[in-house]
Structure formats: C-alpha cells, structure tokens
Image: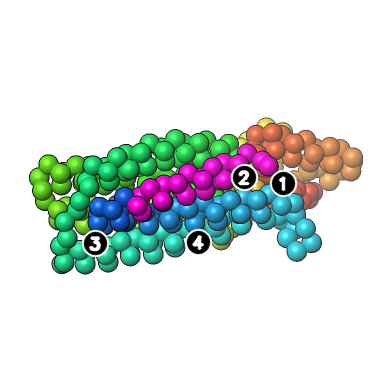
Amino acid sequence: MNEKVRTARLSILSNSGLIIMKLLAGLFSGSVSIISEAIHSGMDLLAAIIAFFSVKMSDTPPDKEHPYGHGKFENVSGVIEAVLIFVAAGWIIFESIHKIMVPAPVSNIEIGAIVMTVSAVVNFFVSRKLYQVAKKTDSIALEADALHLKTDVYTSVGVAIGLLLIWITGWHFLDPVVAIFVAILIIKESYELLRNAYSPLLDSSLTNDETQIISEVIQKKGFAFHNLRTRKSGHYRFADLHLSLPENMALKDVHFICDEIEQEIRGRINNIEVHIHVEPAGQ
C-alpha cells in the first residue's frame, strides 16, 4: 500500500471517530451548530472515502482504454466532493434559519465545547499530514481532503467559541448564527475546491513555471522550438512540441538530442511525459 492510500485511509478513520463524537454531543445538547459540524464531518468522511478510491485508481497503469493513464480520477473525485460540500452547507443554513424562527435552548454546553476542541486538534494534525503527502505526490484528491479538514478546524473552533459565548451571555440565538457562519465557510471551501479540481478536466496548461522550465531546457541546447502544448491529468503531466534541427543531421544524433532533452525535463518536472516532433530548421 503506497503512501497516498495509507494517508487517505487515516482520514477515513479520524473522520469516522469525529462524526460519532459530534453527533452524540449535538443530540445531547440540542445545538444546531454542533450538529452542523457533525454533518460537515460526514461530508469529510464521504470525501475521504472518495479520495481513498480515487488515489488507488489514479495510480493504475495505462491500459488499452486509457492510454494516458487514470490520473483524472482524482479530479473527478474533487468535483464530486465540492458538490457534496455545497449541498451540506445548504442544509445547515436551512436548519439554522428554522432554529432562529423557532428558538430552542442549548444544554450541556461544556460537553459540546470540549468535543469541538478535540475535533479541531485532531483535524489540525490529520490535515497537516494530508497536505504534506499531497504536495509530495501532487495529489489533487488528498489536497481536497486536506482542505476539508483545514476548514473543519476553523469551523470547530468557531463553534466552540460560540458555545462559550452562549455560556457566558445566555444568548442562545448565537448557536444558529454560528452554524450559518460555518456554512458560509463551507461554501467558500467548495468553490475553491471545485475550481482547482475542475480546471484540469478541461486539459488546462501546466503552470507558467513548469512551462518556463521546458523552454529553458531546450533553449540551453541552442535549438529553436514552437507549438509547445502541455496538460495535466491527476499528478501526471504531458507536453508535446516541435523541435527544429539541421536538415542534414544524422538520425542517431537527432534521437540522442531528443532523448537528452526529455531526460532533462523529466529530471526537473516530476511525472511528465514529453513528445517531440522533429522538423528541418527553417520550416
């Protein structure tokens, strides 16, 4: 089992435990903000499960039906996760408005505050681990999962502070207000995730820095090139270009130069496949 899969499994286990804690605390206290956090963690769990299977599928070697590999499974999972988060936020806002219109007191505030604090601490460390592995392996699925948990840290802290204010002031209307604030943060999270996950599905180019590296490698060799095209699929990258070489150059020399360029690019950009079309200089 590779590092990406192990890390995705860690997220599943942590979210499962936090859902149980939050749901029990929410039902026991009657706090809609805690229940909204339980729903948020439920979405996190579903996202973690999707991420778990997507990272397994994305690492599957290319086959006849998918000659460019299965990297976009991670992007598809990111889009699904974003939609799920948006739906959860809508439900939280609906329930919060209902509680504002039909007020109900919150009890056992201390238990709720403790559960929210524990949740924030656990998700802080799990999110940090997910980000580390996501950056190391260039996994959009793990990055999406880490983003969920990072937002969960902020919302859990917000709910805990809201409960503390209710305990100090006795203003129970703060509970649904805090829940709406949580939902707004979740909507912002879903938008950022959707933007990051959906863009590669349209075969967007590599970053300017990565494109610049390709240009530098070729220009350093002293050759001209054009029609550079790049795209990304999961953590895999693809580039193709037209390289101009002297028309009287021996075929073996052409092959050597192309291999040298491809190897140097692969040495500076991870998981990239380069295709070079050679044509006589001046054409």
First in sequence, mark 4 or 2: give its number.
2
Task: Please say if the residues under marks 4 and 3 sit with CB atoms less than 8 Å apart.
Answer: no
The residue singled out by tag 4 in the image is 80
Distance Cα–Cα, label 4 vs label 1? 30 Å
Instruction: Describe the element under mark 3 as helix, strand or loop.
Output: helix
The residue singled out by tag 2 in the image is 5
Q: Which mark is residue 159?
A: none
Instruction: Describe the element under mark 1 as helix, strand or loop.
Output: strand
Nearer the observer, 97 or 278: 97
**Residue 89: x and y, percent?**
34, 60
Most prominent secondary structure in the magenta stretch?
A: helix
Amino acid type, callout 1? Val
Amino acid type, callout 3? Ser
Q: Which mark is residue 274?
A: 1
**Residue 179: x and y, percent?**
26, 55
First in sequence, mark 4 or 3: give its number.
4
Left or right, 202 with reference to 151:
right
Distance Cα–Cα, label 4 vs label 3? 25 Å
Residue appearing at x 79%, y 61% in the figure: 64
Left or right, 111 with reference to 229:
left
Amino acid type, callout 4? Ile
Residue appearing at x 56%, y 60% in the figure: 76
**Residue numbers of the magenta segment:** 1-24
